[in-house]
């Protein structure tokens, strides 16, 4: 294996075994990985050097992942942050606007899935950093909603909506074929191409969050329809 | 809410029962009336006998003498006196000269002067008629009319006076009858007939004494009306009282019931709590007791929910590591890496087993400790033995353990195994946080009605914010690389045992720096 030279990823988790596994998996993908066992140690290092992406656990001694995320956001708005969570009820806080995390994975997760997410997040960050390089890129428009498939960005009536990678891919899968019912299994395959262990309930809570974010941008915008017994459908008439 | 709850109705029923006491008085009036009537009859018979004595003794009754006698008696007796001969023909009548017979029935002159309270006015009052209608309704329903109470056609003026009582008197017996006054009168007249005997002792005629009971009954009617009026007022008072009681007693109860129904959903989840009450009475007590109950229930449900969440959370970390490692095992070729990830899996599996064992232990303590046999244990001897065992096991490594305290036994009541488990966990915690070459001091002393155990270490101490939480299950504030050996359950087990015996355990600062754990156990 060649010595990694790629983007620098900070991995903050107090679980030694998990850290060891994740660091190895990311290293295999060519990333440089710097590990921290608690939030405080990570914060001291981040004050000196910012990584290209941060993978944070939530429950940690000294300083938890939520506090670390808040502090990181004060240093950089653009640094991609991916959370590893083991408690479902924490997700809303993590992904809320107050913290502004970019994506998350629920433990236990697949290493391939993690690597795929990291890749998407880094690409999205890079695309954002480059001011409209090479024109419009691949786009998908449905009425007032515009999806930028390279930047993983959704814009509703010129207002950008902050979506996680998972939410964006779900939205994309639904928007692609308006009126067609997407089963939960199809949505799982779209949002988690590398993970075979995602439950239907996970998709439901993602759709719930996605709906909330869409109505948050425009309260009258409710294009995702539930088809009981089957799945979901993009019913946007526009 | 129903306007009248069952409780309100019951209260109303009790109140009405009290109200009906005057009605019982009303019934007693009937007995009273019968006695008065009997007295009246006796008086009449007396008058008849006196008159019979005065007129008798001759060969036949002299009508003129009888009329003269009655004339003289007129207005001195209340009763109407009539003298009939042996065939029942009227010889003299006390009321013939004075007033028509009907007048005597209408208004009886009052001895004390002035008119009596008019029978009509009492009986015509709306209230009386209402009460009488009710009474008649009752009477018609339950009391059969006695036969033979038809109008007294016997005694119409000018016809032979041959009523049954006169016939009895003419046959030498005493006769009496009561019958309606007739001619549309509602009064009842009492008739008594006594025989008049001639010198030979043969019946020469009879004296018919009749007196309307109207006067008597008018007085009673007044009393009845009074009682009926009291009854109606009491009825009103009872209704008002019951309503008040309902407002102050049953409404709060109804409110509690409504709250209780709204408290849980169909799946039995608690949705809220009782609002409590500022009332100082029993209903207030009930409300507060229910509030406490729901509080305890909510805490217990919260405990169960958080227990499930904690367990699932604690298992996700090792599971994540195992999943990642097995994925990598399938992909990496390097034997050194493969061995490393296989070992990692084993380590995490061992950790999950440790977690399971700890959980079993805690739930076991909660469930079984109260039933375990407890005996009086010398804490001092037990701790000495335990510390010695730890020294041997440590084999010279780790912190020194020093035992302090006065001589003499220190007795507590517990299971020695559980005590050893408790101390083992607390000492293990102290040892693991001790710096190399540090000292852990165990001090025993009597305190209150029991024993106090102090364990001081020289480690980093416990942050004030964590002093309660370190006893929570899975709360662990140690460096990550130690997590494999410590599931975060040791102090939770210690607390479960201590509290199971009714003792207390708390964390604080040791005077020499480091942490101090203080356990108190009852004797």
Image: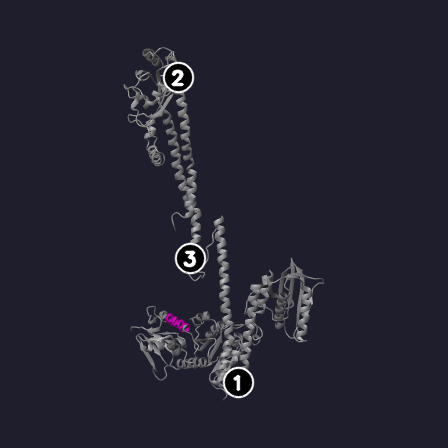
Relative height, residue A64 to residue B164 (above, below): below
Label 1 sits on residue: B338
The C terminus of chain B: image quadrant = bottom right
Distance from the alpha carbon under mark 1 to that under mark 2:
140 Å
Q: How is the image coloured?
A: one colour
Q: Which mark is first along the chain, 1 or 3?
A: 3
* Residue B446 horizontal side relative to residue B301, left or right: right
Residue B468 location, quadrant: bottom right
10 Å crowding of disc 3: few (<14), some (14-19), many (20+): some
10 Å crowding of disc 1: few (<14), some (14-19), many (20+): some
Residues drawn in magenta = A201-213
Task: Give me the disc on residue B49.
Answer: 2
Query: For residue B472: magenta?
Result: no
Task: Give me the disc on residue B51.
Answer: none
Asked if marks 1 and 2 touch (Cβ < 8 Å), the reply is no
Q: Position of residue A57 (x, y in %)?
A: 49, 75
Label 3 sits on residue: B262
* In front: label 1 or label 2: 2
């Amino acid at each position: 294996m060649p010595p990694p030279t790629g983007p620098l990823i900070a991995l903050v988790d107090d679980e030694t075994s998990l850290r060891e596994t994740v660091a190895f998996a990311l290293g295999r993908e060519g990333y440089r990985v710097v590990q921290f066992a608690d939030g405080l140690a990570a914060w001291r290092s981040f004050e000196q050097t910012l990584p290209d992406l941060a993978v944070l656990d939530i429950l940690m001694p000294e300083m938890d992942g939520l506090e670390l995320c808040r502090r990181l956001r004060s240093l950089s708005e653009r640094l991609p942050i991916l959370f590893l969570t083991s408690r479902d009820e924490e997700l809303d806080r993590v992904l809320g606007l107050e913290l502004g995390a970019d994506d998350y994975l629920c433990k236990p997760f697949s290493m391939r899935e993690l690597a795929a997410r990291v890749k998407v997040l880094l690409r999205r960050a890079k695309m954002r950093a480059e001011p409209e390089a090479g024109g419009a890129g691949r786009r998908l428009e449905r009425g007032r909603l515009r999806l930028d498939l390279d930047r993983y960005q959704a814009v509703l009536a010129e207002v950008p909506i902050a979506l996680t990678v998972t939410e964006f891919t779900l939205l994309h899968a639904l928007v692609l074929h308006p009126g067609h019912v997407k089963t939960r299994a199809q949505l799982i395959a779209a949002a988690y191409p590398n993970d075979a262990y995602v439950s239907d309930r996970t998709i439901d809570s993602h759709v719930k969050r996605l709906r909330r974010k869409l109505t948050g941008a425009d309260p009258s915008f409710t294009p995702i329809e539930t088809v009981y017994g089957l799945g979901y459908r993009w019913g946007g008439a526009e | 809410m129903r306007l009248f709850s069952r409780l309100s109705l019951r209260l109303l029923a009790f109140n009405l029962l009290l109200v009906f006491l005057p009605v019982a008085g009303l019934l007693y009036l009937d007995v009273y009336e019968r006695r008065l009537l009997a007295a009246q009859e006796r008086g009449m018979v007396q008058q008849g006998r006196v008159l019979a004595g005065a007129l008798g003794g001759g060969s036949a009754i002299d009508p003129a003498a009888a009329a003269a006698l009655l004339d003289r008696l007129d207005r001195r007796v209340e009763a109407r006196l009539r003298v009939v001969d042996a065939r029942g023909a009227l010889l003299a009548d006390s009321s013939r000269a004075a007033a028509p017979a009907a007048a005597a029935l209408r208004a009886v002159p009052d001895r004390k002067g002035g008119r009596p309270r008019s029978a009509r006015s009492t009986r015509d009052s709306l209230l009386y008629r209402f009460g009488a209608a009710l009474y008649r309704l009752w009477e018609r329903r339950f009391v059969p009319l006695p036969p033979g109470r038809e109008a007294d056609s016997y005694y119409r003026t000018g016809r032979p006076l041959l009523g049954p009582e006169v016939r009895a008197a003419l046959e030498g017996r005493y006769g009496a009858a009561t019958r309606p006054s007739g001619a549309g009168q509602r009064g009842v007249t009492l008739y008594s007939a006594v025989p008049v005997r001639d010198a030979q002792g043969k019946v020469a005629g009879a004296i018919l004494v009749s007196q309307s009971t109207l006067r008597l009954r008018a007085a009673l009617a007044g009393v009845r009306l009074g009682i009926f009026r009291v009854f109606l007022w009491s009825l009103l008072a009872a209704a008002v009282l019951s309503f008040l009681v309902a407002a102050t007693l049953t409404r709060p109860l109804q409110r509690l019931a409504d709250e209780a129904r709204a408290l849980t959903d169909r799946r039995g989840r608690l949705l809220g709590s009782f609002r409590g009450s500022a009332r100082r009475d029993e209903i207030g007590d009930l409300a507060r007791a229910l509030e406490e109950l729901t509080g305890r229930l909510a805490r217990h449900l919260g405990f169960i929910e958080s227990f499930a969440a904690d367990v699932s959370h604690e298992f996700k970390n090792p599971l994540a590591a195992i999943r990642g490692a097995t994925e990598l095992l399938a992909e990496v070729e390097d034997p050194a890496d493969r061995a490393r990830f296989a070992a990692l899996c084993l380590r995490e599996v061992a950790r999950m087993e440790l977690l399971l064992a700890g959980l079993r232990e805690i739930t076991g303590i909660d469930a079984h400790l109260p039933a375990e046999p407890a005996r009086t244990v010398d804490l001092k001897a037990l701790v000495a033995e335990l510390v010695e065992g730890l020294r041997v096991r440590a084999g010279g490594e780790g912190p020194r353990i020093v035992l302090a305290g006065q001589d003499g036994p220190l007795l507590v009541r517990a299971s020695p195994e559980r005590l050893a488990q408790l101390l083992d966990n607390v000492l293990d915690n102290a040892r693991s946080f001790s710096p190399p070459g540090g000292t852990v001091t165990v001090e025993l002393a009597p305190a209150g009605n029991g024993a106090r155990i102090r364990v001081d270490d020289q480690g980093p101490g416990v942050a004030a914010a964590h002093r309660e939480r370190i006893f929570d299950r899975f709360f662990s504030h140690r460096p990550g690389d130690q997590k494999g050996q410590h599931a975060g359950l040791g102090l939770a087990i210690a607390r479960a045992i201590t509290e199971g015996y009714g003792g207390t355990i708390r964390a604080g600062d040791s005077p020499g720096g480091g942490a101090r754990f203080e356990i108190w156990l009852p004797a």
